[in-house]
Every structure is written in structure tokens, then in C-alpha cells.
Image (tube, helix red, strand yellow):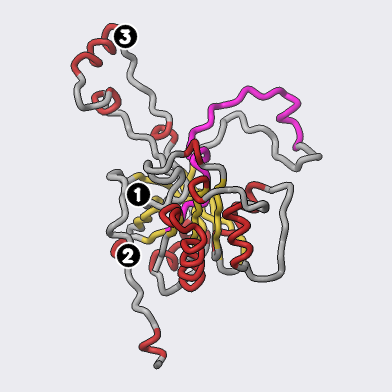
Amino acid sequence: MSSLASKKTSVPHKLRTAAEPRQNILYNVRLSHIEEVNPTVRLLHLAIPPRVQAPEEPNQSDEEVQYLQLIISSQSISSILDLPTPFTFAPGQWLDVHIPSISDAGGFSITSTPADAEALPSLQPTAESLAVEDEETGLPPVDPRGRDPYVELAVQKALSNPASAWLWKPKDEILGKELCIRVGGSFVWPPPSGIDLEKVKNVVLIAGGVDTSSPLLLNQPDDLSIHSRRVSQDDLRTALTGPNGDIKPEETVCYMCGPPAMTDEFVAALRGLMGDGSDRVFFEKWW
């Protein structure tokens, strides 16, 4: 097969994900932090305006609020008072990233937690806590101003992708720039409503590619086993049924995300091992 025939035409993110659900709100954000974790991956923080995450409601007396509640039918009190809708997302979703100078939005996975997008209140630290850094933990002094809400992306260097190429420009050219984002995706936790979470005893997460290092570094697991070999079907079977084989398919959900060949191979194997529970194997394809 020729190289031209074997190459897949790059499909814009918007077309690849056209069937996926999206929120109907665009949020203005600011590129507030850039960190290169290796030569090909950048972590970006997009700062969300605090007023969006913690809007201050206009002063209303109890009687006025009660009156508003009486006249509201299908609308919420927030929309009546013209308050912004807070930015929210579910673990596993991604962002449409709209860059002013680029016609097509880029699509990037969210690598932060929903809690990072919440506005933290100002603190009242003691004088001692502000004086010096914590020498034992290496933590900086407490910031009495709290922390602005943000959402983090892991962006792989791909100069053929206009959005990625822009986000890999020199830091001093793009830091502080304003962008627009929209949340989308159905590959999320918790799983679809048809699954009874009370019966789920086992959650299996299988990943390959850019995002696998981030959760390991952030969570700092106490017990981490590293194997210098490929994952086998026996490994998958043990993960799905437990070391003693006593976990049933209806007690397990499995999420798979990785490169194309890995995803296709593993999803087929997982569905075969799950049998009647194959509808509990969830995956997402970005190609």
C-alpha cells in the first residue's frame, strides 16, 4: 500500500465529534499558565472569571425572592436575575477551544478535576503561615486571595493541527490571551443512567497516550506497580473479575481510551471477556 493511500485524511475536530453532545454555552477564558512537561506535551491552565463561578446575586428581600419563585415556571431564578451559568463538566469530557485567529475550533481533553473549576474563597491565614514556605512539604505560603478557578488541558505538539500549533507558540506570545471554550463529550463518569451504580463494585480504567502520566502524578498513589511488558488478556481478565474471579460482569464497568490500534484490540478483548456485560465497556475514538 502506498504511503498516500495508507494515510488518513485529517478530519477537523468539529466534524469528528459532530454526533457528540455539547453544552450550549461558550465561556470566555484567559490562558494563565503554560508548563512543558516534556518536549511534546504542554499543560495549559485556562482561567475562568471568578464572577462566572461565584456570581453575586443582586440584593433581594425575602419577600421579593418569594414573589419571583411564584412567577417562575420553566425558568430558573438565576436566569430571571440574569446571572451567569457556572462552568461545569463531567470527568472524561473535552473542550472545543476557539482561538480568534483560527477558523476551526481545536478539541482537547480536560486533565483537571471539576473541583479545580470552582472558585476558592479567600482565606484568613495566620501571620506564621504567610511568613515562610513550608520546608517539609515544599508548599508555598498560603495565599489569602484564594485561587481563581481554572480548567487544564494537555496539548500534544502537532504543527499540522492549527489549534495545537497556536497553543505551542512561544509562551510570551500567547500567555494572557483570551479564548472561548465549550464543553462536550459523552465518555464520562458516572456511566449512562441505565447502569445501577449501587451494584458497581469494580471500575477498570485503561489508557494509553498523552494523558496517562497526568493522573499518576496528580494523585500520587501510595501503591504503584510498574511492569516492563505489554498488558495481556490475562491481565484484562484479572482486572475485570478480580484476583479471585469472584466479581461478576454486572458489577463492573470499564473505560478504554488510547491510540487507534490499542483501542480496537482492547475493546474487542474486553467485550469478549464481559460477555453479556459487553455494554458496560465504554470507549472514545479521536480519529
Badge 2 marks a residue whose secondary structure is helix
Distance from Cα at disc 2 to Cα at disc 1: 15 Å
Q: Is residue 273 visible?
A: yes
Mark 2 vs 1, N-terminal side: 2
User: Which residue is labeled 3 in the image?
Assistant: 61
- What is the x, y in percent for residue 61? 31, 9
User: Which residue is labeled 1 in the image?
Assistant: 182
The residue lying at 21 percent from left, 20 percent from top is 72
Q: Is residue 77 above or below residue 3?
A: above
The residue lying at 41 percent from left, 40 percent from top is 88
Badge 1 marks a residue whose secondary structure is strand
Magenta stretch encompasses residue 131: yes
Query: Given the image, on which type of amino acid does mark 2 rest?
Result: Arg
Query: Given the image, on which type of amino acid does mark 3 rest?
Result: Ser
- Front of the two marks 2 and 3: 2
User: Which residue is labeled 2 in the image?
Assistant: 16
The residue lying at 52 percent from left, 48 percent from top is 252
